[in-house]
Image: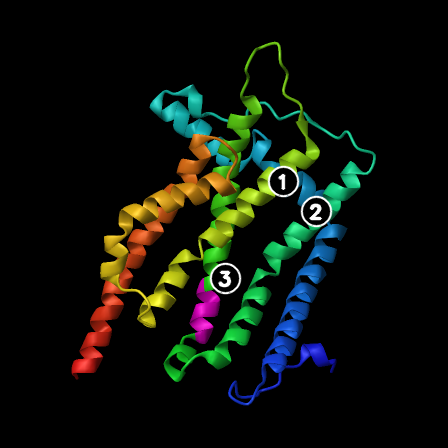
């Protein structure tokens, strides 16, 4: 078996600084290899990845667009019936479509390979954890993958169609026609999905810090207002420059934060009960 595919079971106390770097290097290599394998697969399925997935959110028959239109008809508002006219996407570079194909394939490989990347990250961190923290290793791995895919799904099915409709139809003057550059469309879509996927990992990070008593539920409640401002700042960074997209990212993050506060209180209660027993 090649060396970078094997893991040496060495105690962290026995490893030197350079041995830690070597383990980290092979962790990165294995993670990159997993992403590239899925990227190659995505590259081969060009028509499905591009026509069905990438171009999907701007099509009238996309599931989210149909839902918003049905909701609009129920409440008597046509304003929320979005993306009824597909965007005019253009390519102005000779190698533009080929480069976009590579970018899309790598992004797809990153999304599909994320469970393997998270597994490598957890495997690298695991030796530094105590026995209690190691017990939740498999659950943490499952939860981190689940939260990432939920975030990507939220970005793809909710945030992307709304953002594409808002920015794609926004006009300063009726005489100005919107023709969207291919690279701009792909960059916006992939950035939204990947950013929300990473942002949805926040509950797991907070729970990990709470279990290890780095932060407490009281601390989370005390700095709630500061966190809300922080969420809107993060939303402004990872989303296109429109208020609607920022609000749609910040709102679920705040909802997850409130869930974390309640879970943190339960965890602290269980810890106190164990200590008193």
Q: Which mark is residue 149?
A: none
Mark 1 → mark 2, Cα distance in angstroms: 9 Å
Q: What residue is drawn where x is 42% and y is 42%?
A: 233
Mark 2 crowdedness (10 Å alpha carbons): few <14, some 14-19, many ≥20? some
Residue farthest along the front direction in this orientation: 17
Q: Which mark is residue 145?
A: 3
Residue farthest along the right direction in this orientation: 94
Mark 1 crowdedness (10 Å alpha carbons): few <14, some 14-19, many ≥20? some
Q: Which residue is mark 1?
A: 187
Q: Main secondary structure of the magenta part?
A: helix
Picture quadrant where residue 213 is located = bottom left
Horizontally, residue 246 falls left or right of residue 29, namely left
Nearer the observer, 224 or 276: 224
Mark 3 → mark 1, Cα distance in angstroms: 23 Å
Instruction: Choose the circle earlier in sequence order: 2 or 3.
Output: 2
Residue farthest along the top direction in this orientation: 175
Residues at circles 1 and 2 in contact by the CB criterion of under 8 Å: yes
Q: Which residues are magenta?
A: 137-143
Q: Is residue 141 magenta?
A: yes
Q: Which residue is mark 2?
A: 103
């Amino acid at each position: 078996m090649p060396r970078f595919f094997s893991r040496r079971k060495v105690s962290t106390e026995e490893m030197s600084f350079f041995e830690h770097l070597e383990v980290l290097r092979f962790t990165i290599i294995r993670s990159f290899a997993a992403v590239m394998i899925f990227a190659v697969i995505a590259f081969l399925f060009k028509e499905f990845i591009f026509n069905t997935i990438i171009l999907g959110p701007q099509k009238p028959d996309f599931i989210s667009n149909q839902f918003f239109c049905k909701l609009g008809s129920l409440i008597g508002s046509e304003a929320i019936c979005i993306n009824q006219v597909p965007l005019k996407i253009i390519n102005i570079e000779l190698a533009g479509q080929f480069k976009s194909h590579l970018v899309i394939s790598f992004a797809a490989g990153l999304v599909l390979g994320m469970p393997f990347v998270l597994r490598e990250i957890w495997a690298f961190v695991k030796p530094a954890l105590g026995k209690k923290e190691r017990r939740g290793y498999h659950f943490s791995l499952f939860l981190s993958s689940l939260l990432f895919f939920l975030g990507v799904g939220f970005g793809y099915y909710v945030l992307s169609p709304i953002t594409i409709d808002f920015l794609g139809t926004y006009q300063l003057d009726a005489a100005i026609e919107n023709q969207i550059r291919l690279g701009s469309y792909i960059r916006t879509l992939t950035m939204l999905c990947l950013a929300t996927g990473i942002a949805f990992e926040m509950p797991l990070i907070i729970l990990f810090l709470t279990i290890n008593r780095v932060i407490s539920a009281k601390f989370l409640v005390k700095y709630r207002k500061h966190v809300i401002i922080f969420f809107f700042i993060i939303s402004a960074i990872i989303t296109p420059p429109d208020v609607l997209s920022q609000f749609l990212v910040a709102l679920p993050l705040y909802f997850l934060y409130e869930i974390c506060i309640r879970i943190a209180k339960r965890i602290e209660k269980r810890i106190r009960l164990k200590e008193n027993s």
